[in-house]
Amino acid sequence: MNEAEFIAALRRLPLHPGARNLEDDCAVLELGSETLVLTHDVMAEGTHFREDADMADVAWKLVAVNLSDLAAKGSEPIGVLLGHSLSVGDERFLVGLREALETFAVPLLGGDTVNAEGSRSFGLTAIGRATHTPVPSRSGAQIGDAVYVTGKLGRAMLGFEGDLQHLEAFNRPCPLLAEGKALAGKVTAMMDVSDGLLLDAFRMAQASQATFAIDSMAVPIADHNRREDCLRWGDDYELLFTLPDSVDSPVDCTRIGTIEPQGFGSLVLDGEAIVNGEGLGYQH
């Protein structure tokens, strides 16, 4: 089964209402006067990091990608739970884990360890507190909304390929927690860009049952000679969001498109309709 098939099968299992039908990156739980936001990501050797990777970078990125999901919900991190495969490089992993937790002021709550044989994988659950309700989701984009993205896309790709100027973008991404909190009460839809701008925009279009019309030349990218690659590669952890056309963004960003009236659940790229997400970005 591929990722889409497996998630479709999971949707046939008993789901908590807070799971948002598994169409979002986080679960949202209302507990008394608080709203908790929970997410869990796994990083696997050979897929998310190389065998020779500095394990300090792996630990940092594991924390950062989970906090990026919380950022897209405008939530404030409370703590994390770690699932760790004991193996070579554990000392360096602990160094990077401490650096990330201290940098983002997020404490460790606990977790589990196992002895790893063969390739390694690490999981992290991040728990946050919503700063605004309703908590932003991938759905909610409305006709006439403007589509925005923060930062420049493609920096992680260039870093992965060895470009020293952008190496940090791949090894140690920075979750946009402050930006997410500033946007939470204004956006109609929001998510972080992890699997490529085009694929993630397509996913938001489907979740919102709306048509996202994107102007590829308006998208800020790190290498103008490789625009297509920058739009599809992913791992950028920027924020993709929609705002009513009359609302100004409180964060630095670039307008890249508009929610159009024709059809629903599709992406229009430079005037060409795309109704299948295959090939738009990274998929397991």
Image (cartoon, rainbow, N blue to C red):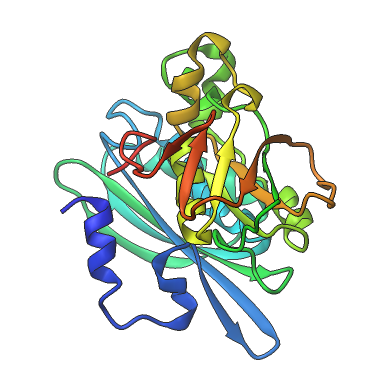
Q: Residue most toward the front? A: 262
Q: Quadrant of the C terminus?
A: top left
Q: In this view, does 116 lie above or below 92?
A: below
The residue sitting at 50% across, 38% down in the picture is: 268
Number of numbered markers? 0
**In-image side of 33 versus 138 (left or right):** right
**Residue 246, horizontal then vertical, whole percent:** 84, 51
**In-image side of 184 versus 95 (left or right):** right
The residue sitting at 40% across, 67% down in the picture is: 22
The residue sitting at 76% across, 54% down in the picture is: 244
Q: Residue most toward the top? A: 225
Q: Examine the rendering and report whether any part of residue 84 can be seen.
A: yes
Q: In which quarter of the image is residue 75?
A: bottom right
In the image, 127 versus 194, the foreground residue is 194
Q: In which quarter of the image is the N terminus?
A: bottom left
**Residue 164, horizontal then vertical, whole percent:** 54, 13
**Residue 78, horizontal then vertical, whole percent:** 62, 67
**In-image side of 60 versus 104 (left or right):** left
Q: Examine the rendering and report whether any part of residue 196 can be seen.
A: no
In the image, 169 versus 183, the foreground residue is 183
In the image, 71 versus 103, the foreground residue is 71
**Residue 172, horizontal then vertical, whole percent:** 54, 34
